[in-house]
Image: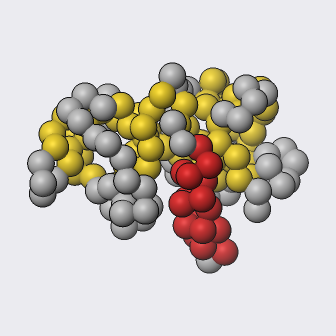
Amino acid sequence: MKLELAIVTQCHSNGCDVTLCKDNQEVRAAYSPLIKNRIHIQPEQLIALDSSIEPPEIVWRWLKGVVIELTDQSIIVDDLQGHPASVTLPAKLPLALHINTDVWVCSTGKRYEIHDLLLEGKPSQSDRLLGYITPIIKEIYQR
């Protein structure tokens, strides 16, 4: 599995058109079996795709969010669709958060987590994000 980050530009029944974060190349990606008909992918979302197969497959998705509450005990993020949620910030991904910080959020199956800041529509630290999420995704897909 070789993971790359991309931003969704358009979706259709079998996958999405995406723009790779690393070089802005446009690619058509299929839904992986774990995503298809289970996870609703939309334009402007961040996805991880497995580029080791052809066509590449979408294997993970992050939502845009904005920090709306920040205390020593909790972080609340609005998913920009009217669904505020309590999230965590993994110790391996320290970020400087403030009210109104734009973030990338996803569920790792256990909880919702902030994985990166949103910078000009992309993750601010793509390599760090991939380093964190790759073992999680590989473990899920090996089950």
User: As drawn, is 123 to the left or to the right of 111?
Assistant: right
Q: Quadrant of residue 27?
A: top right
Left or right: residue 121 compared with residue 88? right
| Residue at image coords 29%, 56% | 88
Q: How is the image coloured?
A: secondary structure
The answer to whether 1 is drawn above or below residue 13 in the figure is below
Residue at 43%, 49% in the rendered image? 115
Q: In this view of the protein, which residue sits in the foreground, 107 or 5? A: 5
Residue 99 in view of the camera: yes
Residue furthest bottom in the image: 143
Along the line of sight, the residue nearer the viewer: 80 or 30:
80
Q: Residue 28 falls in which quadrant of the image?
A: top right
Relative to 138, does residue 70 appear above or below in the rendering? above
Residue 69 in picture, x, y percent from top left? 15, 39
Percent across and percent down for residue 54 are 87, 48
Taking the image as shown, residue 73 lies to the left or right of residue 122, namely: left
Q: Position of residue 58 (x, y in %)?
A: 67, 47
Q: What residue is rendered at 79% in x and 49% in y? A: 51
Farthest right residue?
A: 54
Q: Residue at x 36, y 63 (%)?
A: 91
